[in-house]
């Protein structure tokens, strides 16, 4: 079971570029916006979203790590996504989309 922030410190937040050549400025901007979005979440929400979307783990797998049901993981995902969306202005969201 994951209970402390340090339990997932082994998970890097490095995102591999999709193209052979990387535009350094856009990569830095991308990481800035990802950090900004994740900063509004609590540790548990952040860990769940990282496992789910960066590492493509199933809800079942994540639920077993946190000792909760798959339904609860789904609820936490939804709440976290809603929290990120509500904390971000329209102009910031358009910048994020362009950075991605």
Image: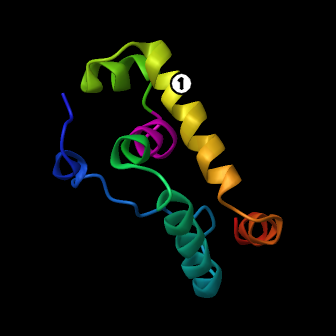
Q: Position of residue 13 (x, y in %)?
A: 39, 60
Q: Label 1: few (<14), some or many (≥20) within 10 Å?
A: few
Q: Position of residue 80 (x, y in %)?
A: 54, 41
**Is residue 88 positioned above or below 62 on the image?**
below
Q: Which residues are magenta?
A: 48-56
**Identity of the residue drawn at 60% across and 47% down:** 83
**Identity of the residue drawn at 57% across and 35% down:** 79
Q: Position of residue 89 (x, y in %)?
A: 76, 65
Q: Which residue is mark 1?
A: 75
In the image, residue 44 lies in the stretch drawn in magenta: no
In the image, farthest residue toward the bottom: 25
**Is residue 43 positioned above or below 69 on the image?**
below
Q: Quadrant of residue 58?
A: top left
Drawn side of residue 40 relative to residue 23, left or right: left
Q: Main secondary structure of the magenta part?
A: helix
Q: Position of residue 44 (x, y in %)?
A: 35, 41
């Amino acid at each position: 079971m994951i209970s402390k922030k340090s339990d997932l410190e082994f998970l890097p937040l490095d995102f591999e570029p999709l193209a052979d050549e990387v535009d350094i400025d856009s990569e830095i901007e991308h990481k800035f916006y990802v950090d900004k979005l994740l900063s509004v979440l609590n540790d548990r929400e952040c860990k769940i979203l990282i496992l789910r979307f960066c590492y493509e783990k199933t809800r079942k797998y994540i639920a077993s790590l946190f000792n909760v049901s798959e339904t609860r993981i789904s609820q936490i995902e939804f709440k976290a996504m809603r929290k990120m969306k509500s904390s971000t202005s329209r102009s910031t969201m358009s910048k994020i989309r362009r950075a991605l």
